[in-house]
Structure formats: structure tokens, C-alpha cells
Amino acid sequence: MKVIGKIALFFVVAIATGLTGCSTQSKSLPRASERVMAEYEEAGDRVFRDTASESTYRLHSLMIIKDDEVVYEKWAVGHSPEQLHILWSASKTFTALAVGFAEQEGLLTTDDRVVDFFAPNELPSHKNKWLEDITLHHLLTMSSGLGDDYSLRQIRNGLGDWARETLSMQHYFAPGEMYHYSSMDTYLLSVIVSKVTGRKLMDYLAEKLFEPLGIDDYYWEEAPQGYNVGGWGLFLTTESLAKAGLFMLHRGEWNGKRLLAKEWFDKAMSPQIMQYKGRETNPERIEQLKRSRNQWNQGYGYQMWCCIDGAYRMDGAWGQTVIIHPEKNAVVVTTAHASNGKTILESIWNNIFTKM
């Protein structure tokens, strides 16, 4: 296994041009015939054209997998198949997979209380009233009630213990009462996985997921305490992302071998909480939201987004997406630097999934 040396986090995604690794053909996904590839060329190229129409949109790569074969792949100028690309919040889904593997080993359950994984000196001296009620399920579904984006910035810029500072944050609601996106929920999951396995999150996933899938080039940023940050900071190639998507499409199987229990995906890839829970009380409005085809209101699973048409996706800032579409038996992967991922999602649905 080859892992590149530690690098700093950069704001501009394009810096990943220098972060390259090598993959062997034997570890590559199968490619469709030239005839099949030609059938998807126009659809894939249209996605590139759609995103190029706006100055703040830059699609870096696009890969389409249909029936377990790559049917389209393209990288923009300045990007390449070997490039390690920052995933931003698409990293979160990998953290959730690590929790699934740990649960399968009997090291934890999603019903376990978060405070039970920390020693007394790792917990705040004055606990918020709901702290002891938070479970791993609440962290996985972004419903812990802890903190906000401002708290995240404070923690990342500070020198204190990230986990302790997160657990000391103000509670905004009782655990499970509402959906509230927080990258620090995911960071706590990373810490907990490390505590129960005795290994860094990345090293644990290397054994359980990356090596079996033939993913041998990656990098994951660390907090000052030495834990992988979990909620962001993972770098992978486009094809490695596609492999992870296929692994989830087949609900834990890879090349006919079961790596992770199907039951985990029954939970992880289903709406565990709706984004408007606790925020919208008008019954008519709730019914409208239920019928809506808005990709951001379809529910949230275990660190991944539910989509329309029974699909699911990893989703990271600036257009890092892995869309798993069981009905189409397909996976679509993008890396990008786009100011609004909505255009990318709409183009994929309009040009790619309508063709399948």
C-alpha cells in the first residue's frame, strides 16, 4: 500500500494536481466496449458543457459506471486519473462505513451513548443537559443538537482538544429532535472508531475497505490530537470513489465477497431523518416537501444524502459527488470546483439517468 506524505489543506481544489499516485490495470474497474462507451459520450460531454456555461463552475472529472462497467470517463485539462482529489464532506460517508465495520466486529452499536467512549477527564466539567442522551445514531444522522458552523470554525482555529471542545458546545435541541448538519458530529465518530479499534480511522479503513477494493493511494488530514478529521480532508482518485460507490451499490459486496453486512446499508442508505424535521410544522407545507423533487429534502441516512428516484449520494462542497442509483444499477462520480452543486445534479439526471 502506498500513502503519500502529509500535505496541508488548501482552499482551492485545483492544488491536487501535484498529488498523484499510481494504480495498476489489475486493480482498475472493467471498461465497457468501445461501442457502449460511444453511446454515453454525448451524455457525459453534455454534463461538462452544462457546468462550463457558468464562470464559477469547473468540473474536474466525470465517471459513469453502468452494470459494473465504466461506460464514460473524462478529466478536464489540468486533471488526471492519477490525481488525488479533495473530497470535502464526501469524506463523511467513509467515516460512517468505518462505524459499520466496527459494529460488525461487535466493538460498538449505533445505540451506544457517546459519553461512554470518553474518560471523565475527556468530558466537559459542566455537562450540557442533553449530552448524556447523544448516541452514535444521532451523530450519524446529524441530529446530536451540538454546535453550529461558527463553533466548527472556532474549534478548527483553536489549539484545544477538538473532541472535548465539541462535547462542550451549546445544545440547540434535544438529540434526535431536528436535523442540523455539523462536521464535528463526524469528527466525534472518527475519534470513537479510533478508540474502539486502537487504530486511526484511515488505517482501519485501509484494512477493511481500501485494500479489498484495490484502493492504494489516499490521504486523510488529521486533527492536532492525531485523529483523522472524519468529516472532511480525505483525498482519493476518481476511480477510487467509483469503487466505493459500487461497493455501496452492491450493499457491502465486492467481487462476490461480502465485506460489510447488508443490514448496515438498509439503515445507512435510507432516510433516517428528514431535513425539515422540527423546522417545519405546517402540515400542508410538510406534504409539499414530501412530494418535492428537491434533492436536498429527500432525507438523510448515515452520513449520506437520499436523492429522488430512490438514489443516494455522497456529497462534498464544490461538487464532489458519488451518486448511487440502484434502479439504474449505476454509479456516477464527479470531482469539481463548482460554487453550486445543483447544476451538476440536474445535469446528471437530465442527461445521464434519462438515457439509462
Image (cartoon, helix red, strand yellow):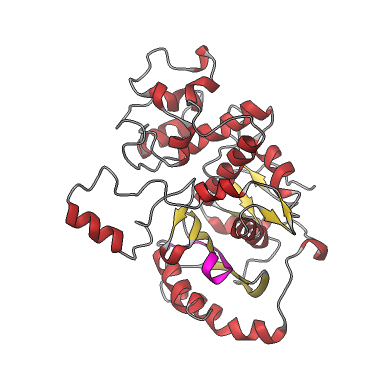
Name the residue located 73 percent from the left edge and 51 percent from the top edge: 217
Q: In this view, does 108 lie to the left or right of 70?
A: left
Give x and y (percent) for residue 169: 37, 26
- What residue sits 43% from the left and 61% below the top? 307
Q: What stretch is highlighted in magenta?
A: 326-338
From this viewpoint, is residue 88 visible?
no
* Left/right of residue 142 with respect to residue 9 in the rendered view: left
In the image, taking residue 195 as reference, residue 342 lies left or right, namely left
Extreme front residue here? 263
Please tell me which residue lies in front, 83 or 322: 322
Placement of 26 over or under 191, stated as above or below: below
Asked if the stretch drawn in magenta spans residue 139, the answer is no
Point 46% across, 48% down: residue? 301
Return the x and y of residue 275 as percentages of the image width and height: 34, 49
Report the number of numbered marks: 0
- 336 in the magenta segment: yes
What residue do we see at 57% from left, 47% from top?
263
| Residue 248 seen in render | yes
The image quadrant of residue 225 is top right
Q: Where is residue 153 in the image (x, y as percent from the top left)?
A: 41, 36
Q: In this view, does 304 lie to the left or right of 108?
A: left
Q: Quadrant of the C terminus?
A: bottom right
340 and 309: which is toward the camera? 309
Q: Position of residue 212 (x, y in %)?
A: 75, 51
Please say if 206 is above or below 135: below
Residue 340 lies in quadrant: bottom left
